[in-house]
Structures are given as structure tokens and as C-alpha cells.
Amino acid sequence: MIVRLFEDKNLLAKTAAEHAATAIRRAVGDIGQARIVVATGNSQLEFLDALSKSEGIDWQRVEMFHLDEYVGLPITHPASFRKYLLEKFIRKVGLTRYHLLDGDGYPREVTQRVGENLTSAPVDVAFAGIGENGHLAFNDPPADFETELPYLVVDLDEACRRQQVGEGWFADISEVPRQAISMSVRQILKARQIIAVVPDARKAQAVKLCIEGEITPMAPASMLRTHAAATLYLDRESASLLSPATLVALADAG
């Protein structure tokens, strides 16, 4: 895993978007199409906005997969990740090939159907974030590091649900769904490249565990360290709890 550190979240987002755009253009040029996985949430807003403005991408040749979604939440709800993706990415770039996770219907049927499409060919680049509790997608600790299923129906822990309230998606924790559909950790790691965009001070403890702690299901995002082509994008705030030795090593690396 490569870690890149930036002074602010806007420069982070711009650079990560340039990385993502390059990966997409290369896949389209090499094999005629690009298959991507897209994350949601407040941490991804600036990144997706910058990516949507990237030039030279033939979006008609891009196929998008949804990383995670709440169970039982209608697409009209402000916190719906389907709504988020449609408004903030899909319609902006004119994507026509995309697979959204409908958690408001029959979630286990959705995991099978979308999972079959997802695993039909390699994913070129997956975008991800890291939760305040260290989750990767909605794989809260302790995450399942063993399953080969592409998607799971998972239980959301209290820390994860409180994060959604803190980000303003829900008025109270009682409104936050208790389950979600999530891409599995192993499936995320099957992507040829992973771009993890993680700004803001509220992610600092999770970032510290991801980079400096053990690779463990209790810190799900720590598994990114096992991927040869994963890049973690941090700003000064999200990197604020890293040790001086780690910061020196990051500076030396690049």
C-alpha cells in the first residue's frame, strides 16, 4: 500500500481524481472498457466532483458497481447511496452501465444478482473510504476476512450508525438502518487498483490503526496493506495521529 499525504482535502481530492482518471483511461485504451467500484459518503464528495470533471474519459465505456447500501431505505431518502450516486456521479458523467444495490427490496437476491455481474470480469479500479470505526465499505469490526462472497448482508455496529448521524444523513440513531449490503473485503481486494480517499480529523484514529496497527478484523481497513496497488490518500487532519516515524517515512517515500 502506498500512502500519500496532502496539506488539505481539496488538493487530496484533485490528485486522487487524476489518479483515478488515468486508471480509467488506461483500462479503456488497453481493453476497450473500464470496470470501477464507487464509494459514497461525505469523504468522497470532493473526489467524485473532481473525477466527474476529468477530461478524456469515454464514460460510455465505463461500467460502475456500487460498494454498499442500507437495507430497507428507499431511494428517495436523503441518505440513500443510490440517490447519492445518481445525483453526484452517474448523471453528471452520463454513465449508462451501472449496477446499484437496491436494499429496499430483497437484499439477498440483490447480493446474488449484482455479485454475479461483478465477478464476471476483473475490476480495474475500486474507490473506497475508511469509516470512523475502521470499516472498509460497510464491513464493520470484526469484519469477515475469509468469505469469498462478492456481497454480504451485514449488521452495522453502533459506531458506524452514529457516524451517519454525525455526518448529517439522519437526525437520530434510531433512524439509521441496522443492516446494509456491503461488498466483501476479499472482493474489494480483487480490484487491480484501489484508491482510498480518507480526509478529515474524525478519521484520524482509524487511519492510525490502518497504517500502524496489526492487520486484523478489528481494523478492517488494515487489509489494504496487503494489496500491492492500493493507494491511501490522506490530508493533514486525517494523518494527525500518525507517529513522527511514520510521517518521516511518508515524507521520504514521496
Image: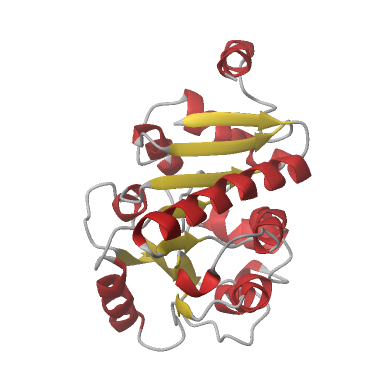
Taking the image as drawn, is residue 93 in sight? Answer: yes
Give residue 109's quadrant in the image: bottom left
**Residue 93 rendering spot, x and y as whole percentages:** 63, 72
**Residue 149 rendering spot, x and y as whole percentages:** 24, 62
- Image color mode: secondary structure
> Which residue is nearer to you in this view: 12 or 81?
12
- Looking at the picture, does residue 118 appear above or below residue 72? above
Taking the image as drawn, is residue 130 in sight? Answer: no
> Which residue is nearer to you in this view: 183 or 98?
98
- Looking at the picture, does residue 57 appear above or below residue 8? below
Horizontal side, residue 130 vs residue 71: left or right: right
Total numbered badges shown on the rendered structure: 0
- What residue is drawn where x is 71% and y is 46%? 14
> Which residue is nearer to you in this view: 81 or 23?
23
- Looking at the picture, does residue 227 appear above or below residue 63? above
The image quadrant where one finds the C terminus is: top right
- What residue is drawn where x is 42% and y is 62%? 34
**Residue 11 rendering spot, x and y as whole percentages:** 75, 41
The image quadrant where one finds the N terminus is: top left
- What residue is drawn where x is 49% and y is 50%? 23
